[in-house]
Image (cartoon, rainbow, N blue to C red):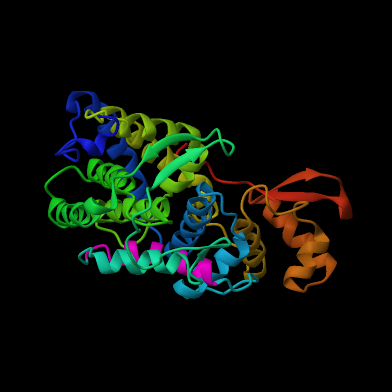
Amino acid sequence: MKYIWEDKNWFDFKYDQTILLKPLSQLRVLQGKLLGRVASLDIKLGTQAQADVLVEEAVRTAEIEGQKLNRDSVRSSVAVRLGLPRGVGTHDRNIDGLVDILLDAVRYHDKPMTLGRLNNWQAALFPSGHSGLRKIMVGKLRGHEPMQIVSGPIGREKVHFEALPRERLDQEMKLFLKWWNFSKGSMDGILRAATAHLRFVTIHPYEDGNGRLARALTDMALAQDEKLKVRFYSVSSEIMRTRNEYYKIMEDVQKYHADVTKWYLWFIKSVSASIEHSQDIIASVFARVDFWNQHAQTELNQRQKKVVNRILEAGQGNFIGGLTTRKYVSIVKVSRATAFREISDMLDKKILRQLSGRGRSAHYDLVWPRKVFG
């Protein structure tokens, strides 16, 4: 047998539980710390954190497939759906469809998964019925042409994987959906997410969009495990960072390796890394919380708070050129003398630190709080 799906019960994956126990326990600790942290966010900051993660997830899950999305357009689409200020991005139906899928997977993770729902997801990825310039089948399972993953120049192609034939597809999808709807709660949620990802990609039920749908199902399974209708870390970002390794291990497992311990270990490692990297995605949100907790007893007027929040929203290192007296005047509309006096007050209170220059040419930055994960 050449491929894993050629075995009769190929989806009955075998793995060494003793090897997974320690990394899985370490992942649960990381997961608990992050979710405990975001639970302290108020509704507004929680929504902003969700938006930041959703933008990253949409951009990266498309990038894995070689599709470059305009980040401002993604941010605008996400903002509309979460009730935040829209921003400057232009409207794009393809982006809207992807964002809708990612939100549907998480917001409604408690609803049953059906073939119709999956078909609608796949159709939403290709609103024009085309993948690039190529017309494809949308909203239904692929046709009878062999589905292969290939690379290399024409005439010297290398076949990395061939999905199971069309005549098996209907039955395999029935079995997958039955397993999906009945496995929740009966196996570890992280391993269930890894299983769903591997199994769906191996079936490869659609002409295009299978990778993005597999990652949406991964998010859905993780949301079911955490019992949350929001995501605070992006697994797709980590897959994008280690894309070559991801493709290699997927190919190794799919070429008839009934023991999938190696895949589970890689998946656990990736989810752990995505949680650790989530501090970069939602750093400004956590920084705002940390900052105001640290300075809860510090007296500042409304103008000073407005300037501080502007720097916090930009994120550490992203307030270009630092704060100057001129920028302070522009933000809160006061005289230069008032701006200088209020900046000096924040220096004395250890809110700001001076970066360079003197007098009118001085530049300042916040005294930023420690990083979320230390």
Q: Position of residue 330 (x, y in %)?
A: 79, 69
Question: Does the magenta segment cover residue 97?
Answer: yes
- Which SS type dominates the magenta stretch? helix
Task: Name the residue at 42% across, 54% down.
Answer: 212
* Numbered marks: total: 0
Q: Position of residue 348 (x, y in %)?
A: 68, 50
Task: Name the residue at 22% across, 57% down.
Answer: 170
Judging depth in this view, the residue of 181 and 363 nearest the camera is 181
Task: Name the residue at 82% across, 71% down.
Answer: 335
Judging depth in this view, the residue of 254 and 44 nearest the camera is 254
| 162 shown above or below 174 | above
| 143 shown above or below 374 | below
Task: Name the residue at 32% across, 36% down.
Answer: 268
| 123 shown above or below 158 | below
On the image, which quarter does residue 260 sit in? Answer: top left
Q: Position of residue 228 (x, y in %)?
A: 29, 59
| Segment tinted magenta in the rendering | 93-110
Instruction: Report the quarter where the N terminus lies.
Output: top left
Find the residue positioned furthest to the front: 155
**Can I make out residue 16 in this image?**
yes
Q: Is residue 286 left or right of residue 261?
A: right
